[in-house]
């Protein structure tokens, strides 16, 4: 019975954790793009994003991580023999990378608050895809365990990376075209303000 409770709350924890990570880096993107806005909008937006980032990180994302890890420890304590399995070693290594990513996001929150972040919005969009890849591989390991088809998984991950990279590039081109259209449609004096 304890195993089922641990497993249920482990799933709840990682859903909350990943939802927080996905949205957090999205906020970073908007925060960086707020620098392109004229004053006073720039300051208002940056202040609002800063509040949202801190709250999301401390009230949702970090507790989600803690619940995930605590329930994982509970799961392993009910089935200690699983510690000998190679799939679990790989999964735990990926979770360690994810915890590092989580803490790096905490550093980015501080850098954004101090206006020291060197990431641009396109780089942050790429960073935002890292937890997606980790999620896919971690879930596949949890479901398939030692029978994970590594050849198909490798192609799946490579396909995801290529798709994500292409999507980010296409979106950047679309944004540039949209901005050029906006500038072309505005009288010359207003165009200088938009730039």
Image (spheres, grey):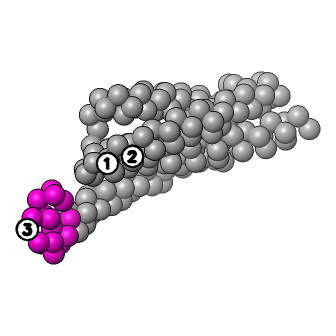
Q: Quadrant of the C terminus?
A: bottom left
Q: Which residues are magenta?
A: 179-195
Question: x, y (%) of residue 85?
Answer: 66, 30
* Mark closest to the chain's N terminus, 1 or 3: 1
Other-residue count near label 2 (Cα within 10 Å), few / some / many at <14 / 14–19 / ≥20: few
* Mark closest to the chain's N terminus, 2 or 3: 2
Q: Is residue 141 above or below residue 186?
A: above
The residue at which mark 2 appears reads as 44
Tell me the distance, in whole angstroms, between the alpha carbons under discs 1 and 3. Answer: 22 Å
Image-quadrant location for residue 80: top right
Please tell me which residue is depicted at 63% across the width and 39% down the height of the picture: 60
Image-quadrant location for residue 16: top right
Q: Are marks 2 and 1 in contact (CB under 8 Å)?
A: yes
Q: Is residue 14 magenta?
A: no
Label 1: state its secondary structure: loop
- The residue lying toward the viewer, choosing from 77 and 37, is 37
The residue at which mark 3 appears reads as 188
Q: Residue 40's mark?
A: 1
Please tell me which residue is depicted at 16% across the width and 58% down the height of the picture: 193
Side of 6 where 145 appears, left or right: left
């Amino acid at each position: 019975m304890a195993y089922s409770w641990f497993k249920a709350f482990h799933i709840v924890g990682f859903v909350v954790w990943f939802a927080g990570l996905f949205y957090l880096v999205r906020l970073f993107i908007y925060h960086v793009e707020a620098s392109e806005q004229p004053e006073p909008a720039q300051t208002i937006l940056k202040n609002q994003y800063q509040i949202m980032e801190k709250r999301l990180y401390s009230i949702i994302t970090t507790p989600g991580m803690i619940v995930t890890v605590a329930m994982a420890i509970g799961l392993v304590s009910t089935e200690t023999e699983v510690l000998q399995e190679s799939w679990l070693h790989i999964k735990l290594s990926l979770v360690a990378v994810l915890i590092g990513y989580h803490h790096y996001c905490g550093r980015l929150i501080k850098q954004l608050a101090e206006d020291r972040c060197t990431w641009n919005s396109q780089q942050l969009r790429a960073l935002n895809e890292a937890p997606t890849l980790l999620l896919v591989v971690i879930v596949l390991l949890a479901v398939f365990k030692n029978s994970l088809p590594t050849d198909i998984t490798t192609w799946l991950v490579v396909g995801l990376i290529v798709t994500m990279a292409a999507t980010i590039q296409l979106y950047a081109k679309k944004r540039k075209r949209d901005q050029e259209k906006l500038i072309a449609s505005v009288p010359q004096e207003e165009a200088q303000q938009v730039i």
